Amino acid sequence: MNDLVSLQKDSGLIAVLGVVDAIRAAQIETAIDFNYTPYVVAGFLFCCLTIPMARLTDRYARKKGYHGAGGHL
């Protein structure tokens, strides 16, 4: 589960490899008209995905008895 969360957090690095993700799409749109709203939307989507996934991972770890892994968000 931690690997899944880490992969999702590192998805911004995927843009270097050529795959268009939310951050790269926001960069392309911003370059066209200098409107930074796509970055705000991409950041919001990032938070909407990352925070619940981290919470779910912590809950799963506590259920399995791993008490030392959880950080506070």
Image (spheres, rainbow, N blue to C red):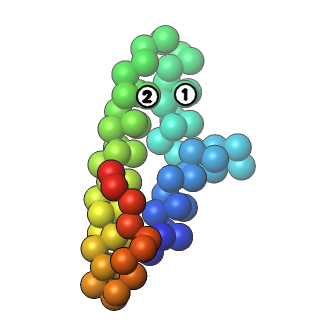
Screen quadrant of the N terminus: bottom left
With 18 as the anchor, is 36 left or right in this view? left
Residue 45 placement (x, y as % from top left): 34, 43
Q: Answer above or below: position of 68 versus 45.
A: below
- Residue at figure coordinates x 56%, y 18% from the top left: 31
Q: What residue type is labelled 2?
A: Tyr
Give me the residue at 63% from left, 47% from top: 13
Q: Mark 1 touching mark 2, by CB under 8 A?
A: yes
Q: Quadrant of residue 67?
A: bottom left
- Can the viewer see residue 49? no
- Residue 39 is tagged as 2
| As drawn, 69 above or below 54 | below
Give the image location of residue 19, x and y in percent: 62, 49
Q: How crowded is mark 1: few (under 14 residues within 10 Å), some or many (20 or more)?
A: some
Dot 2 surroundings within 10 Å: few (below 14), some, or many (20 or more)?
A: some
Can you tell which mark lies on residue 27? 1
Of callouts 1 and 2, the N-terminal one: 1
Q: Which amino acid does label 1 sit on?
A: Gln
For residue 20, say whether it is visible. Answer: yes
Residue 34 shown left or right of residue 12 in the figure: left
